[in-house]
Image (cartoon, helix red, strand yellow):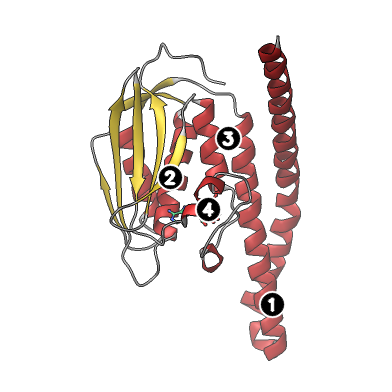
Amino acid sequence: ADISQREVVEHRLRQRETELVGFAGVVAHDLRSPLARIMGYADFLHEEAYDRLDGTQRDFLGRLRKGADNMRVLIDDLLDYATAENRPMVTVPVDLRRLAEEVARDRAGDRAAIIEIGELPTVHGDPTLLRQVLDNLIGNAIKYTPPDREPRIRVGCLPLEGGRWRCEVCDNGIGIPDRDRAAVFDAFTRVGGSENFPGTGLGLAIVHRIVERHHGEVGVDPNPAGGSVFWFTVPTDARLPAPL
Ligand code: ADP
C-alpha cells in the first residue's frame, strides 16, 4: 500500500510541476511583446540619435540594451523549459548523427570550435526535443571553454543492454568541481566559475526533463583529459515504454 501511496504523491507532484512550468511559459510568452517594444525603441535611439547623446546618456542606453538582451535570453530559456515539459511528444526514428551534425553546423557561428561526431545510432524519440538536448549540451561545451582555448568537443555513443544507448558530449572546458556535479541539472542552478559566462541555469534542467520523458538518465563525469563529459541514455528500441 505504501508503494502505491508514494506513487500517487509523486504523480501529484509531477502534475503540479507541469502546471508551474506551464504557467512560467505563459508568462514568458506574454512578456515577449512588451520586451520587443523596449528593445525596438532602444535600438531606434542607438541607430538614429546616438550622435546627439552625451557620454552618460550613451552609457545608460548601453545598459538598457544589455539588460533587455539578458531578459530576452531568460524569456527564450523559460519558453524552451515549458516546451520541454509540456510539448506533446511524438516517437519516431531519429538519426542522432544527422541531428548532431545539424546542431554543430548551427553552432559554428558561436565561435571557432572543433566538433568531432562519432558513429551515432538511430534512436526512438521526439526529434525536436532531442535536438534541444544536443543543442544545449554542445552549446554549453563551447560556452564553458575559456576564450583563450579552442573548444574541442566529441560527440559519441555506446550501446547498453536492453535496447538503449549512452550518448556523450566531451569537452575540454573549465570542468565542474566534484561537490557541484549533482546540482547542475536543477533549474536556475549555476556553479563554480560560470559567473564569467552568460546564462540562466535552465539549459541542463531542460536536458534533464527531455531525457526523463524518454525514460532515460543523464549525468556528468569529469573528463580525465580535463573538462567534462555530459551523457544521457536513449532508447533505440521502439518497444520500450511509451513516452511521458
Ligand atoms: P547556464 O549555461 O545557462 O548557466 P545550464 O543549466 O546549461 O545553465 O548549466 C548549469 C551550470 O552547469 C552552468 O552555469 C555551469 O556552471 C555548469 N555547466 C554546464 N555545462 C558545463 C560544461 N560543459 N562545462 C563546465 N560547466 C558546465
Viewer-nearest residue: 75 or 202: 202
x, y percent for residue 88: 59, 24
At mark 1, the secondary structure is helix
Q: Earlier in the sequence, mark 3 or mark 2?
A: 3
Pointer 3 residue: 84
Q: Tell me which residue sits at (43%, 52%) in the image.
A: 139
The amino acid on which the numbered mark 1 sits, given as a three-letter code, is Leu
Q: CA distance from mark 1 to mark 3?
A: 35 Å
SS for tag 4? helix
Asked whether mark 3 and ligand 1 are closer than 8 Å, the reply comes as no
How far separated are the C-alphas under marks 4 and 1? 37 Å
Q: Residue furthest left?
A: 119
In front: label 3 or label 4: 4
Residue marked by disc 4: 180
Instruction: Reply above or below: 131 against 140.
Output: above
Mark nearer the N terminus (4 vs 2): 4
Whichever of labels 1 and 3 marks the residue nearer the N terminus, that label is: 1
Q: CA distance from mark 3 to mark 2?
A: 20 Å
How many C-alpha atoms fall within 10 Å of the one at disc 4: few (<14), some, or many (≥20)? few
Q: Position of residue 199 (x, y in %)?
A: 56, 58
